[in-house]
């Protein structure tokens, strides 16, 4: 539930119900801990909640436009859930238990995403459309999901691939977790060569520029520590060449090609909040997304 709450389709299509179930699970876990909750963890969490709520109130009162209480309530639930989650995991004596659980869940996500990626070529003509207010996707028997967003289909050497997003609403989230799994496998666990190969294939299947860069950094570190000097240079070069062309095609498409809008949108998402914060550093403009969309139009780069 923790991993899924960061962009999983379960929360995208069932936001309220999934969030409620997640809160109940966390509260039940805290109830089982009971008096074992550390005082330092409890007081620091209470202080964090108080500070965040105070910022919410200030932001709501001094917002430049009328704000939606519903959206503030939603952000409040997210904050409350996050703090409860931190209380639960910070109170665990055995930190390795959390790492082992995360490692197991990430492997399940990897295997599911790879199977989903391969299965697409077989079931692409037998998919059903799922729609919601914020996202649309196609599914095969509610087990495998394929986004219908523009740019989800990539033509690579004449063959159409569907960018792998696994159980998440977009491939960028999947690549983050697969890179975390790669880090755990290289630095914490047994460095299973077959599993490492599958993780690399999984990251490549997302066709994410950020994912490829993170993969390259981790591979260079791994090969540098595990191989002899000249062998490492050879292997790094061997891997870097195809990855360079693979990522450069993606990069050029985002800036000059059919996916130019995706690049521009991310650029605006990076720059507009920064300039808004410079103009209103203390109170901001509120947390209402609809109002934010109106205000951000004043800060377009031409």
Image (tube, rainbow, N blue to C red):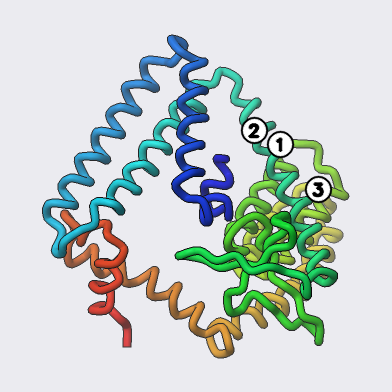
Q: Are marks 2 and 3 in contact (CB under 8 Å)?
A: no
Considering the numbered disc 2 on the image, is that residue within a helix, a strand or a loop?
Answer: helix
Residue 216 seen anywhere in this rendered image of the structure: no
Asked whether the viewer can see residue 301, the reply is yes
213 vs 200, nearest the viewer = 200
If you read the primary sequence from the N terminus, does the residue marked by circle 2 or circle 3 appear first?
A: 2
- Quarter where residue 191 is shown: top right
Q: Residue at x 30, y 34 (%)?
A: 49
Disc 2 vs disc 3: which is toward the camera? 2
Q: Does 18 sit left or right of 55 as displayed? A: right
Q: CA distance from mark 2 to mark 3?
A: 23 Å
Quadrant of the snapshot with the C terminus: bottom left
Residue denoted by label 1: 188
What percent of the width, then of the height, locates residue 209? Answer: 61, 70
Mark 2 → mark 1, Cα distance in angstroms:
9 Å
Q: Residue at x 63, y 63 (%)?
A: 211
Is 232 in front, or is 264?
264
How many neighbours does mark 2 have within 10 angstroms: few (below 14), some (14-19), or many (20 or more)? few
Residue at 58% of width from left, 61% of height from top?
A: 169
Q: Which residue is mark 3?
A: 226
Answer above or below: position of 294 versus 252.
Answer: above
Disc 1 secondary structure class: loop
28 shown above or below 188: above
Q: Are marks 2 and 1 in contact (CB under 8 Å)?
A: yes
User: Disc 2 marks which residue?
Assistant: 99
Sequence-wise, the earlier of marks 1 and 3 is 1
Residue 165: horizontal and vertical position, in percent? 65, 62
Residue at point 16% right, 54% down?
282
């Amino acid at each position: 539930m923790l991993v899924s709450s960061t962009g999983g389709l379960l929360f995208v299509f069932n936001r309220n119900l999934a969030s409620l179930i997640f809160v109940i699970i966390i509260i039940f876990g805290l109830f089982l801990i009971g008096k074992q909750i550390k005082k330092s963890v409890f007081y620091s969490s209470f202080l964090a909640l108080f500070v965040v709520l105070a910022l919410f109130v200030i932001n709501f009162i001094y917002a430049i436009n009328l704000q939606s209480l519903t959206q503030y309530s939603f952000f409040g639930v997210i904050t409350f859930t996050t703090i409860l989650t931190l209380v639960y995991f910070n109170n665990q004596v055995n930190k390795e238990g959390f790492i082992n659980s995360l490692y197991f869940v990430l492997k399940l996500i990897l295997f599911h995403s790879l199977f989903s990626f391969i299965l697409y070529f077989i079931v692409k003509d037998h998919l059903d459309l799922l729609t919601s207010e914020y996202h649309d996707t196609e599914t095969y028997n509610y087990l495998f999901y394929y986004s219908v967003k523009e740019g989800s289909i990539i033509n690579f050497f004449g063959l159409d691939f569907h960018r792998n997003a696994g159980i998440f609403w977009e491939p960028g989230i999947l690549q983050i977790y697969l890179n975390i799994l790669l880090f755990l496998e290289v630095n914490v666990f047994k460095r299973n060569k077959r599993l490492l190969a599958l993780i690399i294939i999984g990251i490549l299947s997302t066709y994410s520029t950020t994912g490829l860069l993170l993969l390259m950094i981790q591979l260079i570190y791994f090969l540098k520590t595990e191989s002899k000097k000249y062998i490492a240079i050879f292997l790094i070069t061997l891997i870097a060449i195809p990855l360079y062309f693979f990522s450069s095609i993606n990069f050029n498409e985002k800036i000059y090609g059919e996916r130019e809008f995706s690049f521009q949108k991310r650029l605006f998402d990076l720059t507009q909040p920064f300039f808004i914060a410079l103009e209103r550093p203390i109170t901001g403009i509120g947390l209402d997304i609809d109002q934010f969309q109106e205000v951000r139009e004043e800060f377009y780069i031409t």
